[in-house]
Image: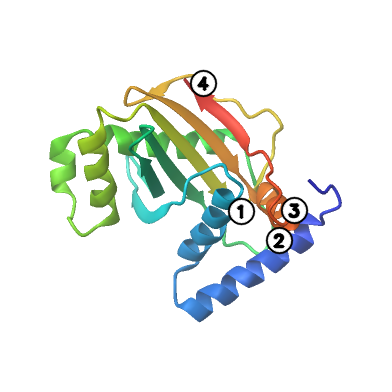
Amino acid sequence: MSTEVDLPEAYGEFHEDLLREASFSGDPQHAVFFRMFADAAAENGDIADLNYTPASREGSRPYQVDGYAWDADRGELHLAVCDYHPELELEKINVDRVNQLLSRATRFCELAIDEEFVSSLEETSPAFELAQLILQARHSISRIRCVIFSNARLATIKKTLESAEIIGAQATCNVFDFPRYIAFINSQGEPSQLSSTSRS
């Protein structure tokens, strides 16, 4: 991994590329951001190829999942949560923010094993697609691998979360922040280890 990367300059170029792609494709910036980070993480070998399924709710019990992949043979559910910052300058996030985002994904999984919740969702929505999968496969899910995509910089070296399970499955959480993203881009495909925390 290169230590010579000028992060502010690299971030400026990244931001320009994202805006250009959003303008060209007509897709929301959030969707373009997901695509860029999901492709990099998948090529880096740390997450499966993800389906973009932005599902979120604000309020007293917020949830959020932006993408998923289901490996039925291994019983692994891959989830992605986006932490997209539209600012022109590179922001920072801390472990509290990581915990908050993981809690949103956890809450969605907990709701998804409730048939009443799944039935309340619009059948054409991304939330229904993922919730129905979790409901139907809940007894087959042995591991949940969550990745947080952030175009900010994780501000701490220590990246640990309290041990726990998600709907009875062993869970891990990886943070793919902007320095990790740009390190992969500059490596031209040389794998780099994701920042990792776990719930087991």
Counting residues from the start of the chain, the first of labels 2 and 1 encountered is 2
Residue 192 on image: x %, y % = 69, 43
Residue matched to label 3: 187
Residue furthest to the bottom in view is 24
Residue matched to label 1: 151
Q: CA distance from mark 4 to mark 3?
A: 32 Å
Q: CA distance from mark 3 to mark 1?
A: 18 Å
Quarter the N terminus occupies = top right
Residue 21 on image: x %, y % = 55, 74
The local crowd at label 1, few if under 14, some if 14 to 19, many if 20 or more residues have their Cα within 10 Å, is many
Counting residues from the start of the chain, the first of labels 3 and 1 encountered is 1
Residue type beneath disc 1 = Asn
Residue furthest to the front in view is 73
Residue 11: which disc?
A: 2
Counting residues from the start of the chain, the first of labels 2 and 4 encountered is 2
Counting residues from the start of the chain, the first of labels 3 and 2 encountered is 2
Marks 3, 2: nearer the viewer: 3
